[in-house]
Amino acid sequence: MENKLSRRSLFRAAAAVPIISAASASAATTSASAAQAPAAPTTPNGGRPDTTAPQFTIAVLPDTQYLLDDGGSDAEPVHATLRHLVRGQARDNVVFMTHLGDVTEHGTATEMRAASRAFDAAGRLPYSVLAGNHDVSGDDQRGDTPYLRTFGPQRFSRMSTYGGSSADGYNSYHVVRGGGREWLVLALDWRLSDAGLAWAQGVLDEHATLPAILTTHDLVWAEDDGRAHLSDHGQRLWDRLIRGNDQIFLALGGHYWPSGRTTMTNDDGNPVHLHITNYQDRYYGGAGMVRYYSFDLARGVIDVETFSPWLLAKGDPTPLEAEHVELSGDVDRFTVEIDFDERFAAFAPPLLPAPRPPSAVMPRGTVAYWRFDEAGVAAAVADGAPVAPGTVARDLTGNGNDLTSELLHTSRPEALTWSAEHHDAQPAHASLRFDGGKQPDRGAVLRTGPDSPINSAKFESGYTIETFLKLPEPFEGDHSWMGILSWEGRAGDAGKHSGWSDDEPTCSLNLSGERFLQFVVYPVPVDADPTSWSHAIPVGRWMHVAIVNDGRHTVMYVDGSKIVRNAAEESRGISTLGKPFVIGATQSAERYEQGFYGWIGDTRIVSRALRPEQFLTARGR
């Protein structure tokens, strides 16, 4: 529409009838200087997006009215944007595009024909369009208009995402697939009637488990610093639709400028992100600016960027054009942080894999497998209850490598407790919570018995050691060089003197002061200590760690990804000394100091190198 701040009173009454031009000038011609959008697709339509990938993009196209004006304009930037989106479906994983209204300047039949031709460039890219005050007047009960004949239900009916429209035809919804799940997109008229509100509520009720993005034309206006506030119509939407429907986590509008954003709290105490996107006040009527909302479910963010594909395609832009190729700043290029699982938990809790029986996760060569649910522990498991000293965690292979719990030093029972927490892909839905620490040293361990076969196993043909772990958030205190798992004994007693100290054990997985995982092993045939190091691992998040040795070299994996700092030295076997294998700490000079601080879940040792698709995280293996 126009600048909210300079004419606030005018746009508070923005329901005015649009000016209908008496002119019937021909549709805007294509700019001769416009270059084609970049990036050569491998197929005419840019390829299909990957709707299962955790990263995907929803494109947002705001007010295009100055580019579709039969009084004299240029529709080429709109064409260029839509071509770019089509060609970027696979490259940028664009799964949907939504227009925020004011498609045209006057809403005439001539302008709507030009808009229709522009949107024909969208090809098979699914999209939604809604009416702004320059396209129509009054509320969604207005009846027939050139807009409705152009962007009514008949335009969307063949799209795979299209779910339906209100009886009047001015409101629609789409179900979009991205990141392996479905998302509801509501495209609401610029003036929603009571009937329109009831229809929208019905759609939400019928799709009660889908996170929803609400799009409309008039929602929020922004101050010059980008702080956004609800408009009068936006307040109505907030009070009667948004705040009471926890599904709506993102609401987008155009109409006003400058762009801006705000976050409000709904009736369930959850954040709702409200953004205004409009660039018609910018050079060349906004130059077809499009905004990418790039969802990243792995990182828990939506990365937002704004750019003009039309200007991007120009080989030799003028200074003014170069200035508008892409926009930066807090309202045009930013990141919205969302813990998607937590935000949607009330209406769409994540579907976690069911626990898997031990027999499903013991491939050929499994020498030991421990888990801390009822399948692995004879004692009753109660979340948060202390693990009594002497409690046995059975080796579910039947090979006799049972673990027995033991408190270190003068540690209290709370140093080791049962926990219902677990990695989403972990076979057992349980873990142990270790509360180890320094000053004074405290902690707990689980040790094999003196005659357990694993105590003396050499693994010269290779091995895979896996475990699940999680560090607390906040990560309080000094826990540097705490052990996660190890074999007891001194490297010096195994005839190994090349390492950091003769007093360290012959094999251990530890955490450095920088939160790097360290796997150090003394191989059987040589006096060496090849060591692998991870990156700084995060806190507050479960992870799977695998150490894989093929009889020659060792590789560490974190969450199935190979780390870079793997030892180049040849490494065959483990110089075990017949002493216990331990979970929860690492010895020095055959003495335990601090214990592990955090959670440990299922732990498995296999006497051969496994591939990542065979790890404990894999389904059906």
Image (cartoon, rainbow, N blue to C red):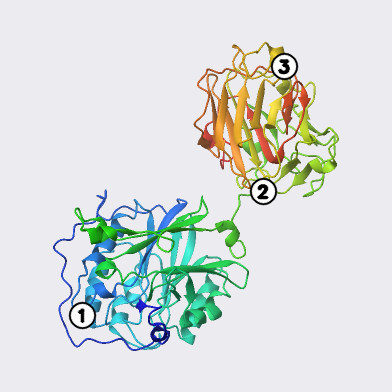
Q: Give me the disc on residue 577.
A: 3
In primary-sequence order, the first of circles 1 and 2 is 1
Q: Give me the disc on residue 204.
A: none
User: Cα distance, mark 1 to mark 2?
Assistant: 61 Å
Q: Which residue is mark 1?
A: 110
Q: Give me the disc on residue 474.
A: 2
| Residue type indicated by callout 3 | Leu
Left or right of residue 202: residue 515: right
Circle 3 crowding by C-alpha within 10 Å: few under 14, some 14–19, many from 20: some
In primary-sequence order, the first of circles 2 and 3 is 2
Circle 2 crowding by C-alpha within 10 Å: few under 14, some 14–19, many from 20: few
Q: Nearer the viewer, residue 68 or 201?
A: 68
- What kind of element bears circle 2? loop
- What kind of element bears circle 3? loop
Above or below, 374 relative to 348: above
Left or right of residue 358: residue 154: left
Q: In x, y percent, where is residue 490? A: 72, 18
Q: In x, y percent, where is residue 608? A: 58, 25
| Image quadrant occupied by the N terminus | bottom left
The answer to whether any part of residue 602 appears in the image is yes
Q: Nearer the viewer, residue 469 or 275?
A: 275
Residue at horizontal 25 percent and vertical 53 percent from the top: 38
| Residue type indicated by callout 2 | Pro
Q: Quadrant of residue 434?
A: top right
